[in-house]
Amino acid sequence: MFKPWTHPLARLLSCLLATPLVLILLLHPGLFVHADGRYAHGALMGVMLGLSGAIVHGVGFDPVSRPWRWVFHPWLAWPLLSWGYVLLWRAQGLSA
C-alpha cells in the first residue's frame, strides 16, 4: 500500500517546516512573546509536539507502537507547525 507520508519529499517537507521554528525557539524565543509580555504556554506545548513529530518524521524514523505512530504522524505534526507559524505571526503583530 502506498503511503504518501513516507515519500522522501514528505520527509523533506517536515524538516523544512520544523527547522525555522526550532531555531527561533532555541535561539530567540522572545519572538513568541505577545505585546503584553506573555507567552501562550498552552499553545506552545502543541507547537512543540508538532516540532517533535516533524523532526521524528523528517529524519525517517517510523515508530512501531500505534500510539507513538499517531503522536509523531505528519498529519498531526504539520497542522501543529502551521499553528506555530500563526502564533509567531500574531506575536509579531502581523495579523490582519
Image (tube, helix red, strand yellow):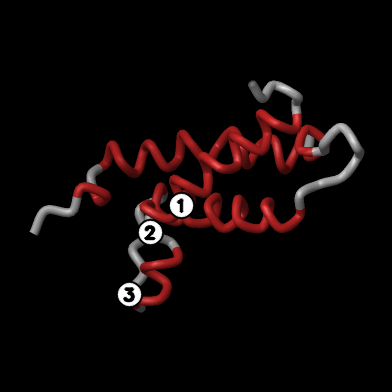
Q: Secondary structure at mark 2?
A: loop
Q: What residue type is disc 3 on?
A: Val
Q: Residues within 10 Å of mark 2 (few under 14, many from 20)?
A: some
Q: Secondary structure at mark 1?
A: helix
Q: Are marks 1 and 2 in contact (CB under 8 Å)?
A: yes
Q: Is residue 93 above or below residue 74?
A: above
Q: What residue type is disc 1 on?
A: Ala
Circle 2 is placed at which residue position?
Answer: 73
Q: Are marks 3 and 2 in contact (CB under 8 Å)?
A: no
Quarter that holds the C terminus: top right
Residue 50 at what x, y percent from top left?
53, 52
Spatial separation of the CA atoms under disc 3 and disc 2: 12 Å
Residue depicted at 60% across the width and 50% down the height: 47
Residue depicted at 34% across the width and 44% down the height: 11
Circle 3 is placed at which residue position?
Answer: 64
Q: Secondary structure at mark 3?
A: loop
